[in-house]
Image (cartoon, rainbow, N blue to C red):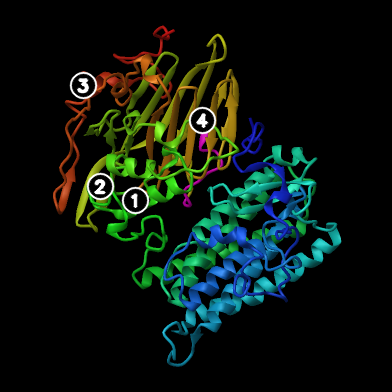
Amino acid sequence: MDPFHSCEIGMVWLVGVAAGAMGGDHSHGGMESHGHIHGGMEGDTGQHSQNAGMASMYCGATDCPSSVKLIADAVAMHAGTDASHTGMAIRFSCDNAVDLARGMAPHHSGAVQMCQTLFAYTTAGVPTADHMAARDPVLHTLCNSIVATQNKEIDFLERWLAEHAGPAGTCGGDDAVALLDTHGMGMPMGCYDLNGRECVTSGVVGAYVQVNADMHVRMAGSMACDPNLDFVHGMIPHHVGAVDMCSVYTAFRAHGIGASEHVEVTSLCANITAAQNAEVAQLKAWLAARGYDPDGGDYSCMGASAGADSCPCSGVTPCNHHGTCERRVAAGSAGKRPEQWVDEGGECEPDAPDCVSAAAAVPHTSHSAGTVGEHSHAAGEHSPSMRAGARKDPHLSFAHGGHADFRGRNGAYYGFFSEPGLAVNVKVEEASFSIKRGALTVDGTFLTELHVVARVGGTKRKLFLASFWASELNENNWGWRVINGSCAGHVFQLGKGGFRRCEELGIEVDMASAAFSTRNWTITVRGNRGPNHRLDVSFLAAGDAAQARPHGLVGQSFSSLSPRYGKQDVYPASGHFVTSAQAEGAIEGTSEMYQVASAHDTRFVFSRFDAVEAP
């Protein structure tokens, strides 16, 4: 199967209602003229109320005047400022070149406006107000170039659209289907014609929605009330968004998808990609030279603490990383179920019981549109004891409680989970990394591949195979071909935003994560940056799934009610350390007994794959 035809069943970003439900104040359909750029939310409290969720993704010094303006710029770029100056939430025509042009024009206008904001809040002399900053010559020169170049490109896009595309239309009528963002923030992402289902199944619309939503999420971070720093932190993901949009255009054009191919648009995308990649490198160097994380780790709101006292479980997590708990409680408030919570902090135990309980106690909202892997249970019905998994290098957490560390053998495959008709294997590879602010170097291992084998269909005679490879993730932690597999002999590939169903088994890919869902299990794999990309894996049971008595390094913990505690590596404060724990004491037998011969081999000492399924 072609990776760009991965949307044949349904999308998490589709809302099966007329776009009029977005509200009459949202006529997203055209593009924002660069000659009429407005400040967005300032003085405009009602017109774009549905985009408050986007502004709420920011944290830090959000009340500072320069922060307010930069946030307003981002909202205006996405939603526009009024009916005549709409933003990137366009009415998709399903013509690849037209939709790229309609989205890129307001995107460019956003960059111009961000530079105008930087000019307004920096001065060549001594700053006269706390919210002002000294002009940075590097950023000032860069912005002069951005304004000149992107205004020219906006002029080209306007002329090209006038010649090659009809009226853009709006998303406010009953003849359009609304699209929402892929991150659960409720941001309108445009629409498509009510009769244009083929437009969606091609995958073009989904790909554009995905990269635009990702860009807006990455742009939203911790504001510092430093116009120079906040500008850089926002412009890097903004530029990456333009490159991603061109990647979508180029990929689908190469596969003959989209009604038209135009040399002018293709050439424009080549120029955008080259120029903005170079400017991203320049901006990252600017951050690094000033002691900031060039990858934006210190800009993210995901791990930001909202204060120890405000989080009911902040003292429970081993490293006392309050942000993780705050994120969980926020996810609960947003209506996300426990299986959707993500340990964004990266340093804390994901299953600290008090934290899970606190988040589960928050009232949850309902979701009208279900997705693969989502069950109809209430949020509190999934006990924390029904989740198990592995994360980082790798630390195992077991159903019903308990932990162990597992090094494995470099290059070997292990049976992580095995029950009748379902097997999950992982590959272990050596990796060296630094922790404790660089004071300690660890020679450990990471999970780098996950492989799923299943018998599917009414008679369980069809074979499903799928592999998730960390090596397919790019520098931005996503890829077009992260999953390769087959369903009853039909080969397929899935990447960012992809979806497929093979009989009763569903696969859904987000950015760096994928979920494999059956009636009884949700298996989630998440890619993470590191010295090399690594994978974190979790297993979530639904109902009485454990009656099948699963086995495997992690799976066996579902088959007993007792917690499992095994050997753990104890890191020193500094120096050099080599991990050695093999989950001794927590698993049946030894780790060697769980080795399988190859990626999709289901045979090991305790395998249950060929056992008779419980009635």
Of pointers 3 and 4, the one earlier in the residue sequence: 4
Instruction: Please tell me which residue lies in front, 612 or 239.
Output: 612
Does residue 107 appear in this view? yes
**Picture quarter with the C terminus:** top left
The residue lying at 46 percent from left, 82 percent from top is 136
- From the image, tell me which residue sits under label 1: 324
> Which mark identifies residue 590?
3
CA distance for labels 3 and 4: 38 Å
CA distance for labels 3 and 2: 30 Å
| Mark count | 4
- From the image, tell me which residue sits under label 4: 376
Instruction: Please tell me which residue lies in front, 48 or 498.
Output: 48
How many other residues sit within 10 Å of disc 1, few (<14), some (14-19) or many (≥20)?
many
> Which mark identifies residue 317?
2
Kind of residue indicated by mark 2: Thr
What SS does tag 3 mark? loop
Instruction: Please tell me which residue lies in front, 140 or 419.
Output: 419
Magenta segment: 475-484
**Picture quarter with the N terminus:** top right
The residue mark sitting in front, 3 or 2, is 2
Report whether 49 appears left or right of 228.
Answer: right
How many other residues sit within 10 Å of disc 3, few (<14), some (14-19) or many (≥20)?
some
Of pointers 3 and 2, the one earlier in the residue sequence: 2
